[in-house]
Image (cartoon, rainbow, N blue to C red):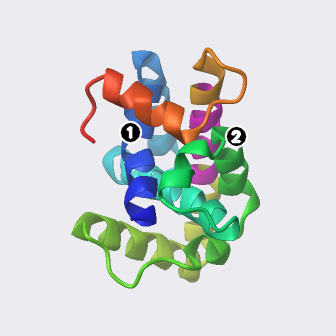
Amino acid sequence: MLWGRCSLLGRVLLPLVDHEPWRQTRRHENLRAWDIDPAAGERLIEIFAALAAHAVAVDASLSAAELDALSLRVVADAATGKRDYELLAGLPDTFVDDRDGLAVNVFRLHAYRGEHYSLRLTRLSRELHHALLVLAERAPIRSPTCGDAFRRAAEAGLPQ
C-alpha cells in the first residue's frame, strides 16, 4: 500500500507542475541536452519521486495513510540528499504495476553502473527537486503535503 501511494505521487507530479506548459518544454530541453530521451527521463523522474517519498516514509515508519501528511519539501530534500542506495532500501519485493518494477530496475542500473549514469541520476534528482519545490510554492498553504498534491491531482482530473 505504501509503495502504491508513493508511486501515485510520482505519476501526478509532472502533470501538476506542467500546469504552465513552458515548464515541460524547458524540462525536455534539459533532458535532451543531457542526452536523455524526454519520455525515458520523465519516467525516471516519476520513479525517483516515488523512491524519495518511499525512503522518507520508511525512515519515519509512516503508513500509506500517513504519507498524505508528508511535506513535499521533505521529499524534495530526500531527492537530492539521500544516496542512491538509500532510496532503494526497503522497497517491496514485487510491484503491483510492472511498469514500476521495470522503472526501479532501470534506476538500479543507473545507480550501479556509475560514471555517466550516476551523473544522469544527479541531474534528474535536481530536476525532481525543482519540480517538487515549484509544486510546493504554488500551494495556497504554507507547507504543502503529499496529500495536498493528491487532492490537486484529483481536482485536475488526473488518473488516481
Q: Is residue 32 left or right of residue 139?
A: left
Picture quarter with the C terminus: top left
Location of residue 119 in the rendering, given as x and y in whole percent from the top left corner: 63, 62
Magenta residues? 124-134
Magenta highlight: main SS: helix
**As displayed, is residue 120 above or below residue 87?**
above
- Circles 1 and 2 in contact, beta carbons < 8 Å: no
Q: Which residue is mark 2?
A: 73
Residue 156 seen in the current view: yes
Residue 119 seen in the current view: no
Location of residue 26 in the rendering, given as x and y in whole percent from the top left corner: 49, 27
Q: Is residue 160 left or right of residue 128?
A: left
Residue type, mark 1 in image: Val
Crowd band around label 2 with a 10 angstrom C-alpha radius: few (<14), some (14–19), many (20+): some
Q: Secondary structure at mark 2?
A: helix
- 4 and 136: which one is in front? 4
- 97 and 107: which one is in front? 97
In the drawing, what numbered circle is on residue 12?
1
Residue type, mark 2 in image: Arg
